Image (cartoon, coloured by chain):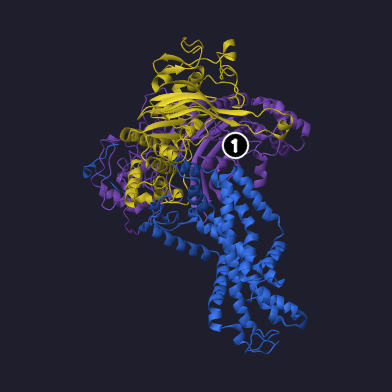
Amino acid sequence: MTSAAAAAPSPARRHGRRDAWTHAWSVIRADRQSMLGMVILVVFAIIAIAGPILAGPIDRAGANRPMLDPSLAHLFGTDRSGRDLFLTNIWATQVSLLVGVVASILSMVIGTAMGIAAGYLGGRWDAWLMRLTDFFYVLPTLVLALVLAAIMGPSLSNVILVIAVTSWPATARVIRSQTLTVRERMFVDRARATGASSARIMRRQVLPNVFGLVLANTTLTIAGAIFLETTLSFLGVGPRDTYSWGRILDESFEAGALTLGKWAWFVPPGVAVVLVVLAFTLVGGAFDEILDPRLRRRGAGPGAEPDATDPGGPLLSIESLSVPESLDPERRGG
Amino acid sequence: MIGLRGLRVHYPLRRSLGAWLRGEPVGVIRAVDGVDLDLGRGEIVALVGESGSGKTTTGRALVRLAPITDGQVLLDGEDVTRIGGRALRAYRRRVQIIFQDPYESLDPRRTIAQQVEEPLLVQGLGDAAERARRVDRALDDAGLRPVERYRDRFPHELSGGQRQRVAIASAMVLEPDVLVADEPVSMLDVSLRSGILRVMLDLRAHRDVAILFITHDLSLAWLIADRIAVMYLGRVMEIGPAETLVRDPRHPYTRALLSVMPSPDPAHRRERRILRGETPDASRVPPGCRFHTRCPLAFDRCRTEEPPSVEVTPGHVAACFLATEPPTDPA
Amino acid sequence: MALLEVRDLVVEFTLGDGRIARVVDGVDLDLDAGEALGLVGESGCGKTTTALAIARLLPANGRIARGTVRLDGQDLTALDDAAFRDRRWTDISVIFQGAMNALNPVRRVGDQVAEPILIHEPTTTREAARRRVAELFELVGISPDRLREYPHQFSGGMRQRVMIAMALACRPRLVIGDEPTTALDVMVQAQILELLERLRRELGLALILITHDLSVVAETCDRTLVMYAGRLAETGPVERLHGGPLHPYSLRLLRSVPDLSGERRLPAGIPGQPPSPESPVSGCRFHPRCDRAMAQCVTDVPVVRSFGEAHRVACHAVGEEGRLRPPGELPRIPSALAIAAASTSGVEVAVDADVLPVSADDLGVPPGDPREPPADRPVGVAGPPMPPVPPSVAPVRTTTDASAPTTDDLPRVDA
């Protein structure tokens, strides 16, 4: 495409973008569920970003006294090697969220590209891309993840990769079916008629129209990715160089925390996983509404409807209005 | 300036599993089956027909949106039937289309200015300022005044008539020589149609654009077009100057169509010649004259031999054996 | 006595934000047995809502707020839902807009047509129902051999015939056709209209035909009822109303339709759009689009007056002698007063609500029109020049603390 295509947005459009953020916020605020989800996410994000900085490294902050019960000094107690579990959980928040977000973005990029290409190009492209998708789709995720993790080694980046590779096909299928309906819309034909290439139509016409779905899907995928990471770590193939919620759970079970009644070891990471997964799901529902301009500007902006429907309001108070013709020198012809 | 020569658009019919097992041959839908048509600079030609007549496919083939099976599309005498890539993009700068449904043909997620600017971006024309100027002019030409009021709106904030104006603007922003208008007013209230038609007449007058006006409504065609072509089952049955064709139709199909056009004036109730049955399927085009199955005048020859196109008067051509004979049917 | 007698029908919708929109506002309507009435107006004029209200098929957020619908003298609005359900289809049936898509794709058409029979006449055996459906098919011109086929095997016109057969299944006396031919080709439309006419003759059906196409009404109906913004504008015998319309809206609607038997020139069209029911216009609701608007039109709701045989019209510009006075004979509004009138009457509301004012072309001003935009347009008026629109629409806001009865409360006279 031409470089001119990337011209700076006009002031009006930039203004429009700010409107969009305001609008997004108003949608979320109006919906109690997504508001709750948002609050949970913000809390976890603050923990993930600020927590490790404030708390410092796990090992040094530890008490070096193993298996302590919760106390003021050690809110969640300590584990077998004497690490402070509260600190470990803070670090784990960062790792788990990082894995979830990065893996999901990767997965969405692959899935969206595959879905749009298959759906828009159709024919042979569709057949082959979907066959590839189906191949990954039918592979048992957990087994594939276990095998890949075992082969590539249990590092953080490998786990992210494993999750991305196994979770994109679901997205690809959803996006493809949405693309199929968008492709039939007249404005796609119109774009073709103006001479736009397939690549451009996919990017400029199709992508914006499936983007709401992509985002709604991302929030769900993040939830799934966090879950998968937890599972992998719990099964012992997660990253070994850092702590995640899954690894804490894994170690607690290995140490028999359940039978020992050391609830503070496994409950916090478990609750965290459930909360974050729930929060992403709650927020996901609001995205479609945010991204649809048809639902925007309702009751705001220059086109605001006035409150004229109130039948009790004063509409008219003219009595015996007379209109002398002589007052109207400029007659309008009809 | 732009012409179609023997244009054919055939689609293979999908066979059912049973048909495949029985070894039946692959059927063909003959959507457009040999159409010749010319548009001069600044001329408005109306393509009239019922659904299934192939009028829309003809228009889409003209802008190279439908796959052409056979025949030629000529622009200024140059064959553009098989061009692709860069040449096709250049062709599309000169030949534009607007669609029937003003609700569907705009991207709901982009502002009016963005939609109208898009063809310029695609074609790589002008810098930002130049593009903005052309967008404004196209909107103004389409009657969306004052332009500032519309630029940053979304399609759902506009009425149907206004959306169709946006569609016209985004086609005209490239300043094409040919505009294909596919049923541009059929989704609009009658009270709004005149406005859109007037925009088209103005565009022809000021921009000298040739318009292929596709419609199922003969009275609209008669209002706006210089010439009318009546299509039936993929072929042009009759073509001629608008007034001539309406006042002195020579093809029985045109006559039937004219007789069933309702009139708002009850004093004008006249005898309707309602054709029985339905237009045959385009995958089973009758042999001989394709209209013979429903023609009130059909005789043996019509069932076997395809009638030639007869020039009744200069420019008035009908594909019927009886075209030059005086009307024999009652009324 | 009329078969159907609708008096002062008011239909209101509750909007998503709790506000009330009055979509039909005091419509009277009479229909004799075997008579065909054409209900016309632009989209959004309340014609479909009127019909749905008569058949009690309003969506959940809509309700009949006032008025009576009498069938054979019995008030249908007084019936409860269950009682009405028995009457629907046996007394009143509906052919819906876009009916071709209203058939269930996975059920045989014969079974679908038989369904209302089995519901309303539970004693009917399946075999009897099938025989009746076969008769109905024959009646509407479909071969009874096709009873066992599925909707996709039918063309659009044939599906519409199926829908008509379904509407006739329980031998109703009144059939409401909501744009029954809109999506069809002219030839198929002619076939369907011919069929409806024949059925009307043979079965003595009363028919309400809702359409935006005045020519369809002219060809098939006995009487026309023109609605504008939820109110009756004009009603009368087809010959009278189409031959000499009294309401400026009817006049302009009729002039919008191209007529092959007339002169070959672009119809004028009608400027602007109907007001939305959420923000009604004061006085005569057509006044912002009317070339005959006077001060009175801005302030007073025109009463419905009778002129001759069943010809009724609601317009201030119609003289006592029953003649629509041309614009030249009418008093004009001095601009300053008009603005004051507009600002106190809530008219600015209508202008603002019309988010996108009409463009000059929508106003039907041909290029080179000699009419100049008025020189006395108030300063600060955004929007295109709107020559034929009276100055009362000037979007000037003044805070007037007027408390007076709303225009809706003004007395209405039934002719």
Parent chain of label 1:
C
Element type at marker 1? helix
Q: Is residue B232 above or below residue C279?
A: above
Q: Nearer the viewer, residue A113 or B96?
A: A113
Residue A264 in sight here: yes
Kindly indicate which chain is depicted in yellow in the rendered structure. B
Residue C60 in sight here: no
Instruction: State left or right for residue B261 relative to residue C334.
Output: right
- Image quarter for residue C240? top left
The quarter of the picture where the C terminus of chain A appears is top left
Q: Position of residue C148 (x, y in %)?
A: 72, 31
- Could you classify mark 1 by the number of other residues whose Cα lies within 10 Å: few (under 14), some (14-19), or many (20 or more)? many
Instruction: State left or right for residue A88 relative to residue B314.
Output: right
- Image quarter for residue C295? top left
Q: Position of residue B16 (x, y in %)?
A: 69, 34
Kindly indicate which chain is depicted in blue in the rendered structure. A
Query: Of the residues shown, which amino acid type is indicated by label 1?
Result: Ala
Q: Nearer the viewer, residue C405 or C38?
A: C38
Q: Nearer the viewer, residue B296 or C2?
A: B296
Q: Is residue C261 above or below residue B144?
A: above
Chain C appears in which tint?
A: purple
Q: Residue at x 62, y 49 (%)?
A: A129
Q: Which residue is mark 1?
A: C99
Q: Position of residue C27 (x, y in %)?
A: 49, 41
- Image quarter for residue B40? top left
